[in-house]
Image (spheres, grey):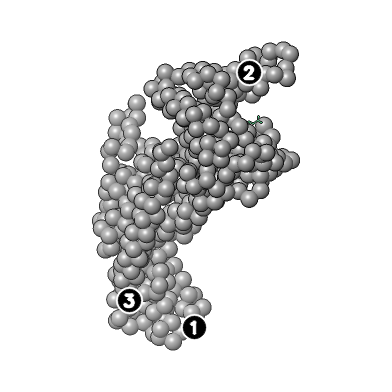
Amino acid sequence: MKLWGGRFTKETNKLVDEYTASIYFDQELAEQDILGSLAHVNMLGKCGILSDKDVQTITGGLKKVAEKIRSGEAAFSVSNEDIHMNIEKMLIDEIGPVGGKLHTGRSRNDQVALDMHLYLREKVVELVGLLIKLQQSFLKQAKENLDTVLPGYTHLQRAQPVLFAHHMMAYYNMFDRDLERLKDGWKRINQMPLGAGALAGTTFPIDREYVAELLHFDGVYENSMDAVSDRDFIVEFLSHASLIITHLSRLSEELVLWSSQEFSFVELDDSFCTGSSIMPQKKNPDVAELVRGKTGRVYGNLIGLLTVLKGLPLAYNKDMQEDKEGMFDTVKTLHGALSLFAPMIETMKVNQTQMKNAVSRDFSNATDLADYLVNKGMPFREAHEVVGKTVLYCIQHNKYLQDLSLDEYREFSSLFDNDIYQAIAIETVVNARDVQGGTARNRVEKQIQLAEQTLIQHNEWWQEHKQKIDVSL
Ligand code: ARG
């Protein structure tokens, strides 16, 4: 007999049961569902809707069901459709008909919304912890590479030299915004929908604020139809997740390039690479490649949920059951990627000599040659032209700018003098970018100092919110 079977005269078609059930995947919400029920029943007692005795029996029963689920003893059934009815059924089996009082003043519509908020707020705190670790790994590489220069690229063509520390701090900053976005979204995740009932509220004199307090929510949804209808807090998370994996994917691409024999800028630790079943010499950057590849599913989950929601009339529609698998999948995909990336970056060996060699045999100091002429009074546009011709001359004579004699330079402009060699030396070129956010060593040191302070704040947020989600009833 179904929990909702009263109105029906026939059994549900087996295929319908299988097709409409969500228990295959929403069993992931078992802990959150029971926690929500413990808070709900506690509130029903406090408001005099259930007797203390019933509350005690139901609370005890829910705890037993929780134990059985944790130990793997409990068997979920498709004919009970979803995690909510599976647990309610288990409760009734455990303590008898009084278990049927648990659902007083509640609907699965506000119940499932509550579970999703509880689940996502925990996961976001976990992900923030992992992002902090990733940021620490960039910081470590940055500190160790304040004297490592490599070519900076635009269009993947050598552009201007930068410190490897600067390149690492670029990623640090991207992930810093990602982290800030997660923190900001968390405020909207931590809102309490229960009490909305099916859509209109409930006739029982419940206390929503009390439930919010028990579960450490920051507030309650003001509108019952909104509370059960929207999934924007999930969409927002999926969008934040998409940016995180975009950043990871760009970094992955660089790691793949840098660890190729052609670049040989870095070597990933053996423990983060894999081999080939046929080519004995291979060491492949599989983790980076796979993260780059998994970007597709994370974007897909975002577009999937947006599309589910776009045509739905208020309030709850069964379509919304489709919010879960994508969210679980994105959480797991990010969790895996971030857990691997922090130690992979931390243990990555940077080939400083190879980077230096690259930057000494290229034209990435050409802008500085132009700036040199500008400092001697030539308009920049003219200087650009002169240096362009000088570079062309070098290419035709198989030379680099630093190889030219002063006589050769003077063929291009009489403004050139002996100080030109110092002006286009790699260290000068890097340290000349002495503006806020520039790659000069002292500016990168400043970025690192700032980042260290910020990480202390992130860490405080993380500790505080770990406590907040730690609810035991
Ligand atoms: N399994 C459902 C879901 O995930 C729970 C809510 C069902 N509500 C309903 N009225 N059928 O969305």
Percent x, y for residue 12? Answer: 68, 15
Q: CA distance from mark 1 to mark 2?
A: 84 Å
Q: How many marks?
A: 3
In the image, residue 210 above or below residue 58: below
Q: Along the horizontal axis of the image, is 105 left or right of 93?
A: right
Q: Residue at x 57, y 44 (%)?
A: 207
Of callouts 1 and 2, which one flags the residue occurring earlier in the amino acid sequence? 2
Q: Residue at x 45, y 42 (%)?
A: 123
* View extreme (bottom): residue: 377
Q: CA distance from mark 2 to mark 3?
A: 82 Å
Pick the front one: 245 or 208: 208
Q: Residue at x 43, y 76 (%)?
A: 370
Q: Are marks 1 and 3 in contact (CB under 8 Å)?
A: no
* Secondary-structure class at tag 3: helix
Percent x, y for residue 224? Answer: 66, 44
Q: CA distance from mark 1 to mark 3?
A: 18 Å
> Tag 2: residue type?
Lys
- In the image, which disc is placed on residue 189? none
Of marks 1 and 2, the one in the foreground: 2
> Tag 3: residue type?
Ala
Q: Is residue 394 visible?
A: no
* Secondary-structure class at tag 2: loop
The residue under label 3 is 423
The residue under label 1 is 379
Percent x, y for residue 73? Answer: 42, 18
In the image, residue 115 above or below residue 218: above
Which quadrant of the frame does ligand 1 lie within? Answer: top right
* Secondary-structure class at tag 1: loop
The residue under label 2 is 2
